[in-house]
Image: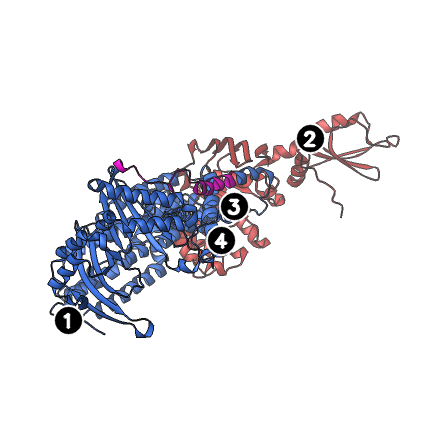
Amino acid sequence: MKWEEKTMTSRTPYFNKTLFKKNILGFWPLWGVAGLLGVVVSLGILNINLYDETRFFNSVFELSPIINVVLAMIYAMLCALLVWKYLFSEKSDVFFHSLPVKREGLFLTNYLSGFVIMLIPYVCVGATVVISSLVHHAFDAGVVLRTVLIVLGENLFFFSLASFVVFLVGHLASFIAVYLAANFLAVLFELVITGLARGFWVGYDTVYNAYARFLSPCVHMIAELEESGNWVVAAYAAVGVALSVAAMLLYRGRNSESAGEIVAIRVLRPIFKYAFAIVIGMLGGNILYSLLYLFDSDSAYRFLPMLICELLMGAIGYFAAQMLLEKTVRVFKKKNMTGFILVSAVLILICGSFKMDFFGVENRTAKAEDIKCIEMMAVGARCEAGQDDSDRLRKILDFHEVILENKEDIRFADDTSLWTLSDYRGNTVRFVYTLKNGEVFERQYIFRPGNEAIYNAYENIMKDTEVKRGFFSTEGVKITNIELFQMAGEGAESTYEQTSVHHVDYNRILNALYKEADKIEFFSGDDYALIMNISSEKAKNSDYYDYYYLSIVITPDMKNVVEELIRTGLLANENGTLKLIDEEYGHSQK
Amino acid sequence: MIEVRGLVKSFGETKALDGADMNVRNSSVYGLVGPNGCGKTTMIKHLLGVLRQDAGTVSYDGSDIWENASIKQQIASIPDNWFFFHSATVSDMKKYYQGFYGNFSEERFKKLSALFDINPSRRISSLSKGMKKQVAFWITLSTMPGYLILDEPVDGLDPVMRRQIWRLLMDDVYQRGTTVLVSSHNLRELEDVCDFVGIMNNGKIEIERSLTKLQENMVKIQIVFPEEVKELPQGIPALHSSRMGRVYTLIMKMNEQEAKDALSQYEPLMFEALPLTLEEIFIYEMGGKDHDIKDAVL
């Protein structure tokens, strides 16, 4: 048949074999290198653990969430970049969209080929590991299936997320930036917000709440895999499916003229501009402030310098976003000033709201009747008060009130230039409120002898018998060790003896301490006396424990306590002088 | 037939197409001309189904082009800056096109290899601009297109290759009924091949006629007035006038007879009507549409 007589044959517009093949074969350097590295590394790990059957088995099938998730996240970005890069250039965009394939066809073909490219290295590594496990009789079909499902789920999610981001932007650089932001920005932003709270609010000491962690999939997936198990991958896989559908819908609505644009969807451009400006203002402002105050010992923020830093970085962010959107550096025009003022106003509002504490976080305590339990951490130990200990609860609340009334004295507690010599003996007190409605909040304060009002209130409360008893509550607390120290002499002449006990009835000692709480003095660090260190732990949840370490001075007039220690065999009373003994429970040393 | 009706396309605040209408008859060569920035490339991108219009329609034989893969099977295009994969050889690109265009003719590709003396195993990126263009024609014409849309098609080709390419295109039009739309600033070349011409300005097709009618509608007159007529008389409807000695050259938007009638009252000593080239028609048509040819002071 002559070419002139040939009739047109139809090809399916929804999937194109040529494009699929071209993607797979054309991008072999990526999956080839990834596969080779994966195989070499996995063989290396297997070889190291070959001598130990259990370790070998674990190294074969145990996925490290951090490595696995981060690798999947980065690799998905590269794969998406390769199969969708034609959307970032006008020339290639025109070529692909003039081909006789519908956009759905281009999407499906590119999506599938990208996903296959993602999986090839895993298949290589998987095959290596399965063969090795078979050879060494460590194969477990159930574990292999679970591993395959986890890998599929993770990759499906990250590749779908990357594909979704592709259709929001029109430029390679913005794709990388938005994709990384989608994975990490929420956590970073929360860290900045928490940092501002810590810097501006006296007592607010939370580093990270993880409220926004679910909006940073990479971080959230790692955390959930470590904390809650593999179910989270199934949820992410479902989100991945939804994102891929959303990506296809975005592709159908995408205008080719957006190739090369920073933001592909017109309505998102102002959102990008303002979000970029605010994020740069806050993130960059904090970094700039930190650089300016790099050698400042104080962790509290100074309002005006912080505001100036944020406004400066906000201006840079705003005009940089404008430059990226307009593709020109000539953006300092009158029409753009309204936006600049708006961004500045928002930054002033945010920074101001922390400084002015609009939400009353800094001054927050709770009404006694709303409290289920309050814990006061001081001298390394924990004093607890509930509704049954109303007197103790009231005293702790009053102490907290005193701190808040004098908070300006300790706002810049870390600023060593404000310290007197005695201030080098500072104290830290932490309050943990558990309210009846289930809410928990914490505050922590650092103060020094120079902060007179607070320090006096602290000394008073630490001398209060009822409060001291709170430190020896046996409820939920497990004593893990008791040590006795005998310290004598000064300087080079100083000696100490030590003995410790295990497996004794700790509760008898604690009960004795409870009874004689009025005689207890907490070890301040410079007493030359007989010291008892009590190490304890309290279960926070099924996996985590809080650990405490309490040091108290033992004096002969603490008759019950001394009696118990003598009974335990740790101590001897020689003519009214208490001495450590080295018996069956422990040892002494000089 | 390619029909464009009321096509509107804006890029931000810029209106690239402002209600453009266009009719390209099947088996004809249509020249799309216009000043820079008038919307030609935007129009072509709509004709290829790449851009989505804000308003209006673009159809091929009554079928809308947008997301219409079966119509696109019949359309091939060569933009000014033809796309190829960076490391692709001629053969790779051929295979790629083969995978998309059901009508791709291996036989024709082989026949055309005699014309385009390029080794198919050569990387396209290593070829000169003109050779890249030849590869574009080689592969594109092998897809056996029913519609061929070309943007500055022979730019970069040597004169011999230009003639070869035009001849190939003309053969396709006459033998296979291919419809060719060509956008170019080389009006001299278009004049030789176009059946119809569309003159675009400010996002609209201002004039759309057959080349013959276009030439009939405008005339260049060389005229000598009697001695007593010292200046060009007022009231002569000339688009442009110039004088050399006693001979006036007038461009008039009318046919020869109408021009003769209009000028007979001045009893000219000499009257001669000359046909205008497409370039002259374009220049004088645009001259009246805020596209004056301005004297540059150097």
Looking at the image, residue A101 sits to the left or right of residue A568; the answer is: right
Residue A462 seen by the camera? yes
Tell me the element at label 3. Answer: helix
Check disc 4 and give the amino acid type.
Leu
Residue under label 4: A288
**Image spot of residue A528 (x, y percent):** 28, 66
Residue under label 3: A311
Q: Quadrant of the C terminus of chain A?
A: bottom left
Which mark identifies residue B253? 2
Marks 2 and 1: which is nearer the front? 1
* Stretch of the chain drawn in magenta: A342-369
The reply to whether the C-beta atoms of the residues labelled 2 and 1 are less than 8 Å apart is: no
Marks 2 and 4: which is nearer the front? 4
Q: CA distance from mark 2 to mark 3?
A: 64 Å
Check disc 2 and give the amino acid type.
Lys
Tell me the element at label 4. Answer: helix
> Extreme right residue here?
B228
Check disc 3 and give the amino acid type.
Leu
Q: CA distance from mark 4 to mark 3?
A: 11 Å
Q: CA distance from mark 2 to mark 1?
A: 124 Å
Which mark identifies residue A350? none
Which mark identifies residue A582? 1
Q: CA distance from mark 4 to mark 1?
A: 58 Å
Foreground residue among A536 and A514? A514
Number of marks in picture: 4
Q: To which quarter of the image does residue A570 belong?
A: bottom left
Tag 1 or tag 4, which sits nearer the N-term?
Answer: 4
